[in-house]
Amino acid sequence: MTERQRSGLSTQQKATLIAIPVVTGILFLILQAMFVEDHGRTLFFTTEIATMKLFGAAGCFIAASRYRRREYMGIAWYLIGIDYFLLFVKDMLFGRTIHLPNIDPELASTLRVIFVIIGNAGSAIGCVMLARVWHVAGIALPGSRRLQYAAMLVGIAFAVALVGWGTWQDIGNLRSGDKESYVAIASNLGDIVSFSAIAPILLTAIAMRGGALAWPWALVTLSNVGWLLYDMSWSFERQWALSEHTLRIIAEFWRGQGCIMAFAAGLAQRWAIRSASRS
Amino acid sequence: MGGLPPHEIVFRHLARYLGPHTAKTALKTFSERALQKPPEMVTRIDAPRLLQALKPMLRTLIGADECDAVLQQVTRELSL
């Protein structure tokens, strides 16, 4: 029995899935060092973030395309993909650095709020759907029921602790009429749900260890962890005592990893299904 | 795989996707639920009912097209 017949993915496919985030991370670190001048650096980050989001969207849509319309997993992948795609469109058409020519700043701000709210709602629902797959499919998660609930509670508590305070401050800013606070609140609430889903998604990946489906689940977990580390970079900026310059590199590195892991996860999902049935 | 017992054939196909641990648990759960017997006691005559019981789980995880392809392959290997 070959490796592919045993686990559904070939060694080459596994190597590719590992190489994607590693190579992307290295490329990011090299390229960011080449843009030292303020305007060029801002443009680099804007382009890099948008490109990574586009990759994230592509990965999710690639995964979703393996399912028929209205199938549970397909819907979950589409919803997460829509989030990445809307965030990409927002950055390209209504962003602060890149935007449509002559667009009214007030209108651009409103559109940013709408895109972020819809995107984050989609992502939150998609993540909850992924987190519940074990229940919907009727498979067992590893560990005792008590341990599973404990892991989920820790995940939720950690998510609230990380993003809760910032959200509270954003709600305060909203009262003073800062429209961009809607973006921050929607983003934070989406993050709380996504980070809370890390534990059940990780447990699902562990349950399927040794099988082809463990790969997409592990990579979705890592994608959410990437976003969590991105948020942590800004949430603890004072405690880190780092310069704005260094902090930006760290934060954008993790945001990029969050997006590219979603791309790799989608690819893994597609390969897991296709390769197993054709081997 | 002609000489393998039915549960072993089903297990091998499930394990490709779910890994050996979850494949074993799922096989046990669905065998007991659909046939009221452990997987080791499943005969070729029982197998279609077991595959039918596994269908919703597989459809959720790998989609209907893939699920149908896998179940057809298992059916072929079981010479049903």
Image (tube, rainbow, N blue to C red):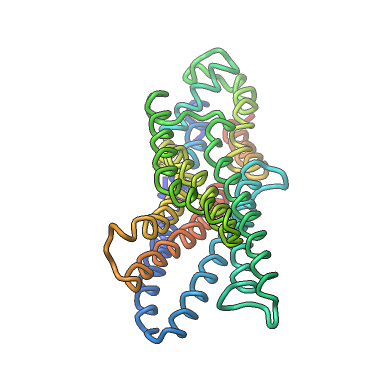
Q: Residue at x 40, y 48 (%)?
A: A162
Direction from residue A4 to residue B68 in the image, left or right: right
Residue A65 visible to the viewer: no
Residue A108 visible to the viewer: yes
Direction from residue A56 to residue A31 in the image, left or right: left
**Quarter containing the N terminus of chain A:** top left
Q: Residue at x 70, y 82 (%)?
A: A102
Count of numbered badges drawn on the protein: 0
User: Where in the figure is residue A227, as x and y percent of width and height?
Assistant: 44, 56
Q: A101 or A72: nearer the eye?
A: A101
Picture quarter containing residue A33? bottom left
In the picture shown, does residue A165 fall above or below B21? below
Q: Residue at x 45, y 44 (%)?
A: A214
User: Where in the figure is residue B43, as x and y percent of width and height?
Assistant: 55, 19
Q: A225 or A139: nearer the eye?
A: A225
Q: Residue furthest right?
A: A69
User: Where in the figure is residue A40, as x and y percent of width and height?
Assistant: 45, 85
Q: Residue furthest front?
A: A176
In the picture shown, does residue A81 fall above or below A68? below
In the picture shown, does residue A133 fall above or below B43? below
Q: Residue furthest top?
A: B36
In the picture shown, does residue A153 fall above or below A125? above
Q: A7 or A111: nearer the eye?
A: A111
User: Where in the figure is residue B2, as x and y percent of width and height?
Assistant: 51, 33
